[in-house]
Amino acid sequence: MITTRLIRLGLIVGFAALVPAVFVLLAGQSLWRVLTTLVLYAFGPQGWSEVLVHAIPLTLIGLGVAFALRAGLFNIGGDGQFIAGTVVSVFFAPYFGGLGLVGLLAFLTCGFIGGAALGALVGYLRERFNASEIIVTIMFNYVAVQMVSYLIRGPMADPMPFWPRSYMIPPDCILPVLVPGTRLHAGLIVALAMVIVFAIIQHRTVFGFQSLVLGANPGAAIYAGFRVKALTVLVMAVSGGLGGLAGAVEVGGLYQRIVDNMGEGFGLAGIAVALIARLEPIAIPFAACLFGIFFAGGGALQRELALPFPLVWIVEATVIFAVAALHWALPDRKVAA
Amino acid sequence: MIPFLEARGLTKAYGQLRANDDVSFSILPGEIVGIVGENGAGKSTLVKMLGGAIEPDSGSIYISGERVTMRSPADATKAGISLVHQHFKLIDSLTVEENLVLGRPELRHGVLNFKALRSGFEGVGKDLGTSLQYDARVSTLSVGGRQQIELVRALFHEPRLLILDEPTAVLPPTERERLLCLIRRLKERGMAAILISHKLDDLYDCCDRAVVMRAGRVVGSSDLRSDDRGQLVRLIVGEELPPPEVRRGTRGAPLVSVRELVVRRDNGTVAVDRGSFDLHAGEIIGLCGVEGNGQTELMHALAGMRAIEAGEIVYALGKQTAVKCDAASLRQAGVAHIPEDRLHHAVVPSFTLTMNWFLRKLSERGLVSFGFLQRLSAAKATHEAIAINDVRASGPRARMSDLSGGNQQKFVIGRELGEGVSVILAGHPTRGLDIRTVAVIRNRLVAERARGVAILLLSADLSEVWDLADRVMVMARGKLRGPVPVGETSLAEIGHWMTTP
């Protein structure tokens, strides 16, 4: 029994290693150099902070995906909710100038509300019209991309429009840099705080319990008398809100404005992060760091070895496959709640 | 005479647990043998070994005197053994014919001669006296119809031994009668059959002898003379059953009044068609009907799990006379509900017992405060409840899916019943459970009635209704008949009502 499991695990890990390796070889690079470049960069003097910088939004989006998935809802709309968060937070940011910490918190809250509104809409469409949340969230991603693209060229454009980008947020809304000389910003604290908050919500509160029941056995949720429709909308709102918060954090911590294509690919990576963490809040920052290495390191591979960045996406896809296959090798999870 | 099948010393262990320990028995051609035992006695393991699904750790199987090794169900089929599972292995969205074809080895060759197969199926079907619509989707069939597909599938190989695992557990009385008739007919042709059942009546009606299993061993057998029934029960349970609770209730005021109730199914068809009745304190009303005639929807509407379309349900509970009809408020007001579908409604199988305890207790003081779960208090309450209700589990941290069906049901009942309950809605509370658990649950219901609780008992087991209920009510195609006092009607009349709306 145990040996079969080990063999299967070996096969899965082998698969996950083999696929990216093939593409590295196709791109004409040596595996060894790629690996050493990646590791040296990620744990090197500049790289470590970049890994964390990328892990911040991935943690938040991953938390949101995991929270919805535990409730049986597949939120693929991380990208759209991220954008909604940037738009709403930047839209209201001018009103928060001069408010200090209160302004910063209000700014972040606006990001959460932006994503939550979009998530809640998806939940509502699902409950009202029986629309698949998978399809709807994917569609909204495209809507969001086009909307923001219009906004930063039109109503919310930079007053001096050299590039398609929005106006700047006031200094009060900017997340301070934690380690001088790096880009690592206070969004790290926001992300870790959310991890703790959601670990508690998931396992200690009635709301978290209800969402777990909804995912594990919808019939039991009806038997228990939960208001399933309202619960679905709420779970989608919270899940989307985390995506939106990621957007606001990215604006406040890195760009100070909305720029074209920011956060591209984070939505999908967030799903991978949630899956690798096996939907467990506490494990999510670690999974996010792994993808932080791929994202930050992907840039380094592009610069130093001229490897195309989409290699990161290949790694991402492989990881999703491998994680999806894990149940084949692992014993059943003993306790789900 | 050489036995068709002989098992010698079959042993199968799962970890520490010896599911089958040195099991030996034999069956002659044309013999019908019942295998009985409580849940966990090892019947399923034995059946799986005979059906080729698992291999014994030691021991051997002889077919017509020859030793055989069966590594897969296909090997068993070749040896002339067919199996009808308790849980049907059918795909709802496919037609009857497509489901039958799925089980055929010809499928491997990639091309199917539907015509030839169809005539084969029809031959077997006609032989059985079935009226299967081969182009109908399985989802449109009754439980009995689904079982007939399984029977056609099993008999298509012309087996010499048919194994039926709990075949009557889900059947209404008329269809049960038909099935037993069929088994007797097959016997006349020299086919042997093994009947696994919890219901002693099945054995007495149909079997030549019974083999009793307990804790993985064969502990005895019975030639099923009607005067040794008590002896057989003692053999199965290993001790005396608790004596049946006989206290009557005193009928009080109506606690639930249903008037002109209309409830629809998810697909929009009318499930309950203008039903009216009163359920009084201190009485048990038995609700009978062929599966799928609206009883489930009625129970769910009463429990607040399904919206009502027209009419009303008035609960007179405590000071209030009407309660907001959602499952949580009803539960709080004292309406306990034992759902008929345990795994889809009553419990979350992947959760621990403690987390399952919360499921219907979220408004209970001490278990939840300010929206936070008090897991320690819940664990303590769970611990006490599993001790009081004799739930066999390793503890509050055990996973619900690791419990046997009977223990799950005892857990559910322990969670639902207690102080403050004045109405019990019980959906098939003893279905598929072993004799001892059935006796415990029945006694519990009767004791609750004596306390003045009003009980609506949905049951497919008419003898259970006759034993427990004061009045009986029948549902056919959404229409209610009754309730009438049990003493003023007969099994024949109820059976007639069940089939003619």
Image: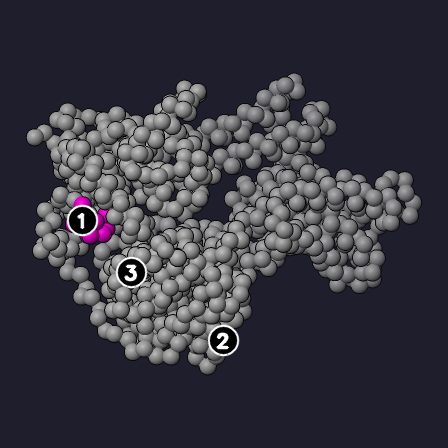
Give the labeled residue for mark 1: B205
Give the labeled residue for mark 2: B322
Whether residue B202 appears in magenta in the rendering, the answer is yes
Q: How many marks?
A: 3
Q: Chain of mark 3?
A: B
* Element on which disc 3 rests: helix
Give the labeled residue for mark 3: B493
**Picture quadrant where residue A307 is located:** top right
Q: Chain of mark 2?
A: B
- Depth check: give the residue in front, B127 or B360: B127
**Residue displayed at 47% across by 61% down:** B273
**Picture quadrant where residue B348 is located:** bottom left
Give the mark nearer the N terminus: 1 vs 2.
1
Q: Which residues are magenta?
A: B197-206
Give the mark nearer the N terminus: 2 vs 3.
2
- Is residue A197 in sight in this rendering? no
- Eye-nearest disc, 2 or 3: 3
- Eye-nearest disc, 3 or 1: 3
Q: Chain of mark 1?
A: B
Give the mark nearer the N terminus: 3 vs 1.
1
Q: Is B499 on the left or on the right of A77, as rendered?
A: left
